[in-house]
Amino acid sequence: MEEEINNSNKNNNIKQKNENKQEELNEKQKERKYLITRNLQEILGEDKLVKQIITGKNIHVYWGTATTGRPHVGYFVPIQKIADFLRADIKNRLLYYEYVIKALMTALNVPLEKLHFVRGQSYQLSEPYTKDLLRLSSLVSLRDAVRAGAEVIKQMDDPLLSGILYPLLQALDEQYLKVDGQFGGLDQRKIFILAEEQLPRIKLGKRFHLMNPMVPGLTGSKMSSSEEYSKIDLLDDPDVVSTKIDSANCPSIESGIDNGVLAFYQHVVFPIIGGSIIMNNQQFCDFPSLQKAFKEELIKEMNSKIILNNF
């Protein structure tokens, strides 16, 4: 009980410090912070981010991705967030899939000048990196490594060593990419926490971490490259797209089941169009108004799927 009270007091103190720093921001800095943090699900180390905004120094953020299949439209969610980073004058460093990511950014009319692509092999095979990996592996327990990768690494009764090392590698990337923070999905949270807890133990510093929400798939589960009908591939033919949308899960809001169709409107359609849509002779300026109409049965499943097919 005493430990819970101490943790609560600690969290309240951090919150108070963040609020005090927020008051120190001028209007331009507040706008920059808004661009960086809007539509995120969670932020770790927000005080570090605010401090860097106040000092006016260049901020570098890293996003790494390793798709398990063909890239799908769910990638528009992190890409839109990276677009916000670029508008907020943040320098972005990304690993892998340069051509696909550049094409997505171009589709969103985002300038690419401050986007830098880095291949892991350019630094991960170096002697210093290997030595730091060995130092880190001597401090992190098997349990903590497995737990850190639980949301992103396939879980097996007899896990491969590569999967166990993966969270440690991702944590070290922050140091060798020379970034101030890392961006990823909420499923990366445990890896981010491992980085925050373990990197300072080998004197490599603590970064901030920004997390976007996970987009439910069209079938209601997590949108995944390995689940064919949960997502729409960027290279799908129009007839395949229509088939996937027509078979998508679209239950009532009261059911408590993830609605893949509404999630697509929330995370992809509205952010991309940046305006209103017309559905069933009604105008919707944002996702909450569309969600409310669906809940009140002013629009039906068929209406939402027809517009999505034509998007």
Image: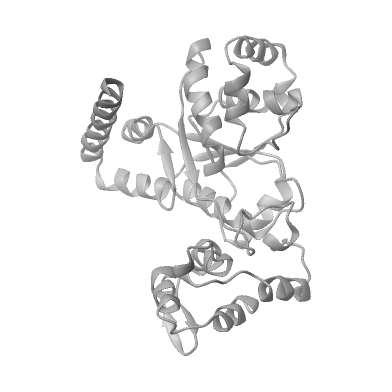
Identified at 26% across, 21% down, the residue is 2
Whether residue 2 is visible: yes
Whether residue 274 is visible: no
Up-down relation of residue 177 to residue 237 (above or below): above
Percent position of residue 176, x then y: 61, 22
Q: Taking 308 as reference, is 155 left or right?
A: right
Percent position of residue 233, x then y: 73, 61
Identified at 77% across, 71% down, the residue is 240
- The single residue placed furthest to the bottom in the displayed view is 281
Percent position of residue 256, x then y: 48, 63
Q: Nearer the viewer, residue 39 or 1?
A: 1
Percent position of residue 1, x then y: 28, 24
Up-down relation of residue 168 to residue 252 (above or below): above
> Tell me, what colour scheme is on the image?
one colour
Q: How many marks?
A: 0
Up-down relation of residue 282 to residue 188 (above or below): below
Q: Taking 295 as reference, is 6 left or right?
A: left
Identified at 57% across, 61% down, the residue is 109
- Residue 153, quarter of the rendered image: top right
Q: Taking 9 as reference, is 139 left or right?
A: right
The image quadrant where one finds the C terminus is bottom right
- Residue 119, quarter of the rendered image: top right
